[in-house]
Image (spheres, grey):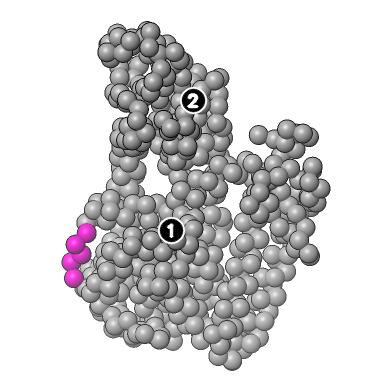
Amino acid sequence: MPCPTCGSILVRFGKFIICPQCNKVPILNKKNAIFELYKNELAVEERINEIIRKAFNKNKLIIELCWERERFARKFFEEYQALEANAFLSSNLLILRIITDDSFSGRKTVEPYEIKALIDGFKAIIESKEIRFLLMQGFAEPMPLGNKIHSLYNEKYFPILYTYAIYDILEEAEAKEKIKEYLPLLNLAKAKAKKTQYSPELFIHKFYPTIHQFYCCFFTRNELYTEVFGLLKHFAKEKLTPYNLMALVNSYLMNHNSLYHTSSSEFIKRAKKYFRMDAKKIRNSLIFSERNTKIFPFFVEINGRVYISHRATFLVFILLHAIVYKKIFDKETETKSRDFEKEEVKKIFQNMGWQYLTNITDKKKATLEIDGIAIYGRKMIVIECKGWKLKPFSEYKNQQDQITRDLKGIVDGLKYSKRKPKPIPPLLEKIQFAKQNMSKWDLDPKKIDSVEGLIILRNYPPITEYKGIQISCIKDLEKKYNFRTYR
């Protein structure tokens, strides 16, 4: 909600939610800020390109970028560092850009600190683009910070921010615990070329949160992510199997301080065993080179040598499950949504001391179905559960608008699809049904003072109330409805 004093949009300033107008926080003109950010991005990228073209040997630079990408992935799995998507994107983006750049004249071998500075430079460009995206979508306000433009998340972005916290943003103590989830993944990554213990169905089921996180939170943020990770679609198009990919990668020795590399002819010969394709198909589908830049750079060819990236490939292998096995992934999403509707909410209310009824229908009107009814003391809540899945970051503005529309539709009795809205029993009607049929569930109407409506989402909702119906994220139920504090 806006500032109660002046009506301005609220922003997050450090740990505090404040009104920039009342607190005299300087806010820039949004259109001017967007233009300045864009202009600066172009200037920084041009300057970076000018420096590296004159200074470094192109092929050696690409090899070092591949190694830096691998080091990042190894730290993620083996030391547990937070998945810094922009760093991983930067290394891949630079590999894609540099291999097609014919303007290199430098001879110098790049040093590790120079690689870090190069990746940090591209990370700054990516972060600027993300700020621009937030400003363009109306999720942030631009504030001057020295000679730079900083973004302050505004209240339109809060539900998205809180939702991402559910999936990924962790406090340090929680982050140390999170590594336990990745240990089975690491063990699988270390497995040599043998039949995996996981089928695609089992892998997606067991590691669904990680796959979901990679796909939605990290790899589809903006056009730069699409430029790089959109190339993975060729895996699905060519019907290539991610498990064969990892079997091939793990058939090679993993060096400790450098990337393993082999001759192109040996790589093609070995890859034939796993993918059962001819040499031309192997080259076109798997070997990224100056002549073949329309595929993801798993295996990069430099001067007739193919470089193998073990952990970087495994990190993308996880993501590939949402792309190559999309039907299985979507089915698992639907299953988890049904489990959410039937079991998770029920368990939370029961643990708080509430009586909880499920699968309530009207025999006279088959379309009227209530997800759950919670009773505590003299209060009854008629519950509707919706498990919308987390969307890619770049789609969030549209999704927030659609969720707002759909939430209002639940109350008003309209279900939206690609076509015209379809009439459904409104939640308001379900509340009336519950009031009139308490005796059917062995409830005494005289002992119930109020019957309320509640819509529960897995993610944080863009609106929290509509026509007297409360709308809540599942994470907030205990705070709002715990029997010790509920009034």
The residue lying at 28 percent from left, 53 percent from top is 206
Q: Residue at x 19, y 62 (%)?
A: 197
Return the x and y of residue 82 as percentages of the image width and height: 47, 64
**Is residue 305 positioned above or below 421 on the image?**
below
Q: Is residue 418 left or right of residue 50?
A: left
Quadrant of the frame with the N terminus: top right
Any magenta on residue 196?
Answer: yes
> Residue 130, position in %: x, y?
62, 56
**Helix, strand or loop: magenta stretch:** loop
Mark 2 crowd level (few <14, some 14–19, many ≥20, 10 Å Cα):
few
Callout 1 amino acid: Glu
Residue 262 rendering spot, x and y as whole percentages: 33, 85
Mark number displayed over residue 75:
none
Identity of the amino acid at label 2? Arg
Residue where numbered disc 2 is placed: 487
Mark 2–mark 1 CB contact (< 8 Å): no
Read off the magenta span.
194-198
Q: Nearer the viewer, residue 362 or 32?
A: 362
Label 2 element class: loop
Label 1, secondary structure: give it.
helix
C-alpha span from label 2 to label 1: 32 Å
Provide the residue designation for mark 1. 174
Q: Quadrant of residue 437?
A: top left
Which residue is pictured at 46% across the width and 54% down the height?
168
Q: Is residue 419 visible?
A: no
Of labels 2 and 1, the one closer to you: 2
Image height of 18 relative to 443, above or below = below
Q: Is residue 83 left or right of residue 193?
A: right
